[in-house]
Image: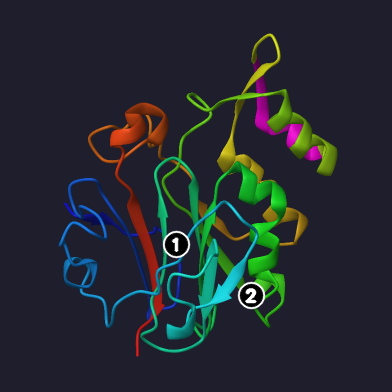
């Protein structure tokens, strides 16, 4: 198996995949992702820096700094790379706008999800969200800096952390994302049931593999 498909009620014209570690070897490996996933065109690559920058997926924005992209253009492919961070895919129910988000804890705290949602013209109840493979709370140990930045922004975020050791918590990226989505009145949220660290046969994990870590690609587009 080369990829997984989101299990969500997206419109039939919205296509989305996340590659597995056995399915694609990386952008510079010579392994053409457009051929692997039968994409309609090459994706719009971003220079991801854990920022809060959201870009329209256009040829002018290829390789620009950004951690989310969106499009209403058919066959234009939004793509983010992850290896423990949370890939978030978004579509409206009409299948006329889609987005892909790279949401590590820094991006989440900076509001990358909220800023991506703001690019959609539809009300929140018209949006569908899929949370792709990320590190689970069982393996995501964080310090007080991470705990404080989330709980000071939203008191509800405390429920996404379990005390683990002195000034250490196990953080739940999936729940942190869900909290922020629900605060934006988005309740049609799917996915969030993988662990990149534990499921070594399926996924890369930066915390597990360190410098030898590859990346998974999450893509979404409107089939034209």
Residue 11 versus residue 224 in the image, above or below: above
Image quarter where the C terminus lies is bottom left
Q: Residue at label 2?
A: 126
Please give the name of the residue rendered at 70% of the width and 62% of the height, measured from the top-left corner: 114
Residue 119 versus residue 50 in the image, above or below: below
Where residue 201 sits in the image (x, y, percent)?
22, 35
**Position of 120 compared to 185: left or right?**
left
Asked if residue 159 lies in the magenta stretch, the reply is yes
Instruction: Judge by depth and name the residue closer to the eye, 64 or 145.
Output: 64
Where residue 146 sits in the image (x, y, percent)?
69, 32
Q: Name the N-terminal-most of marks 2 and 1.
A: 1
**Is the stretch drawn in magenta largely helix, strand or loop?**
helix
Instruction: Judge by depth and name the residue closer to the eye, 28 or 148.
Output: 28
Residue 8 is labelled as 1
Write down the region rendered in magenta: 156-163
How many numbered badges does the structure rendering display?
2
């Amino acid at each position: 198996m080369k990829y997984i498909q989101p299990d969500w009620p997206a419109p039939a014209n919205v296509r989305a995949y996340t590659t597995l570690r056995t399915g694609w070897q990386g952008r510079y490996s010579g392994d053409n992702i457009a051929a692997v996933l039968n994409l309609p065109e090459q994706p719009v690559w971003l220079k991801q820096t854990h920022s809060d920058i959201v870009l329209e997926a256009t040829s002018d924005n290829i390789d620009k700094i950004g951690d989310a992209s969106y499009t209403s253009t058919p066959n234009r492919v939004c793509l983010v790379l992850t290896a423990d961070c949370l890939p978030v895919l978004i579509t409206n129910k009409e299948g006329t706008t889609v987005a892909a988000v790279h949401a590590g804890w820094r991006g989440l705290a900076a509001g990358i999800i909220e800023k991506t949602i703001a690019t959609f013209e539809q009300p929140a109840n018209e949006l569908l969200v899929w949370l792709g493979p990320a590190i689970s709370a069982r393996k995501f140990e964080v310090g007080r800096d991470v705990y404080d930045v989330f709980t000071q922004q939203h008191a509800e975020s405390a429920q996404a952390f379990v005390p683990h050791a002195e000034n250490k918590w196990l953080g739940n990226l999936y729940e942190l994302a869900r909290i922020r989505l629900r605060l934006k009145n988005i309740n049609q949220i799917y996915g969030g049931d993988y662990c990149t660290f534990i499921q070594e046969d399926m996924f890369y994990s930066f915390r597990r593999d360190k410098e030898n870590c590859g990346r998974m690609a999450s893509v979404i587009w409107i089939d034209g």
